[in-house]
Amino acid sequence: MSVAGSRNSIGVEIAGLGHYAPERIVTNAEIEQQLGLEAGWIERRTGIRSRRWAHDDQALSDIAIAAGERALERAGLARKDVGLLLLATSTPDHLLPPSAPLVAHRLGLSRAGGIDMAGACAGFVYALSLADSFVRTRRVPVLVIAGNILSRRINPEERASAILFADAAGAVLLAPSSRENAGVIGCELASEGDGYDLIKIPSGGSRQPFRMGLDPIETLMSLSDGRAVFQKAVAMMTDTSRAALTQAGLSISDIDHWIPHQANARIIEAVRGRLGCSADQVISTVPDYANSSAASIPFTLSKGAEARDYRSSQVVLFSAAGAGLTGGAVVFRL
C-alpha cells in the first residue's frame, strides 16, 4: 500500500494515544483456586500473572471513553474536527444499538460518524487500516478505539477461557500529515472460515437466538480446540506479517517495534520465532494485563509509550488473529 506519488498526497500520523484498564486486579491464584489448579499453572502455560476486570457498574462504553478521552487530550485537536469514530469491540453495551454513537457523543465528537466493528481479536488491525484510508481520502482525523469487557463472557468452568481473558481499552487518534511516507505502508488482512467454530459464543445471534429456558452457559465464550486455535493463530499472524512486510519493502530487521495481539506468551513467542524477530523489538503487556482481544494492541501501544521512545519515521508492525478466524498485519511508519 503506497502513499507516495501525487502532488497532493498526504501521510497519516498518530496524533494521540490513550489506554485504560479497570482498577480491579484479578490474580492467577484466585482463578487457580476456583479451577482446582496448582499454584503457578497459569503463568507457566500462558505467561499471564494477573489481569484486570471491570467493576459491576462499568460498561464497554465507559472504558472506551476513558481511553478515547486520553488520546484526544494528548492530541490537543479540536474535537469538532474528528470525522469518524471506529469502535472495535466484541462486547458492546447492547446488541442494538451500536455503542460507537454513544461513545462519540460522550467524547464531544459532534461532527463524527461512528460505527462498531466486530473483528474479534483482529478488530483493531482492521479498524486501523480503514481509518488510515479515511484520513487520506477525507483529510480529517479519525479516532480508533478498541475495547472489551470479556470478564462477563468468560465461562468460569472452562479452563481455556477462564485463564486468558481480561478487560481493557486502547485508543489511537490518526490525523493527516505532511509527511507522505507516514502511516500504513503495508497491510495484509485474512480470514479462514473453516475455523469459524473454534472460538464462539453459541447463543444470542440469529442462528441460536435468546429464548426462554436458555442455559446461561450458552451465552458465554467457548474455545473448542485450544491446539487448533494455537496452530492457526500462529500461522495466520506469521503469514500476514510477512506479506505486509513485503508490501512495505521491508524485512523484520527493519522493524523498530513489534506489537502482536496479546493472546498469550506462547503464541507471541511462536510467531516471534518464525518471523525472526528479536526480543528487544517486542512490546508486550500480557503478563500483567492478559488478553483483552481487539483492545490488546492499542492498549499495549499506548502503555508502551511510557517506557519506549517512539520517534518519527520509526516503523511498527502490528499482528493479530482471533475468532472467525480473522486476522491480519499492518506495517505503520510513525
Image (cartoon, rainbow, N blue to C red):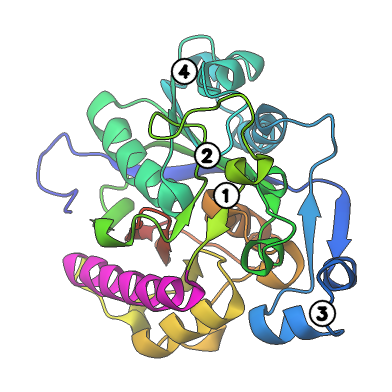
Give residue 286's quadrant in the image: bottom right
Secondary structure of residue under mark 1: helix
Residue toward you, 218 or 235:
218
Q: Earlier in the sequence, mark 2 or mark 3?
A: 3
Q: Earlier in the sequence, mark 4 or mark 1?
A: 4
Residue 47 appears at what percent x and percent y?
A: 68, 79
Inspect the image, locate mark 3, and give the three-letter code of the amino acid beneath it.
Answer: Leu
Secondary structure of residue under mark 4: helix
Where 137 falls versus 74 (above or below)? Answer: above
Q: Identify the magenta region.
A: 225-247
Inspect the image, locate mark 4, and give the three-letter code of the amino acid beneath it.
Answer: Asp
Q: Earlier in the sequence, mark 4 or mark 3?
A: 3
User: Which residue shows up at 37% across the image and 25% down it?
Assistant: 140
Write down the residue under mark 2. 89
Residue 149 appears at what percent x and percent y?
A: 67, 43
Write down the residue under mark 1. 295
Question: Which disc is residue 37 wearing?
Answer: 3
In this rendering, the label closer to the viewer, 2 or 4: 2
In this rendering, the label closer to the viewer, 2 or 3: 3
Residue toward you, 271 or 130:
271
In this rendering, the label closer to the viewer, 4 or 1: 1
Q: Is residue 17 visible?
A: no
Q: Quadrant of the C terminus?
A: bottom left
Q: Is residue 269 visible?
A: yes
> Between marks 4 and 3, how big is the CA–CA gap?
52 Å
> Between marks 3 and 1, how big is the CA–CA gap?
28 Å
CB atoms of marks 2 and 4 within 8 Å: no
Q: Is residue 52 magenta?
A: no
Write down the residue under mark 4. 81
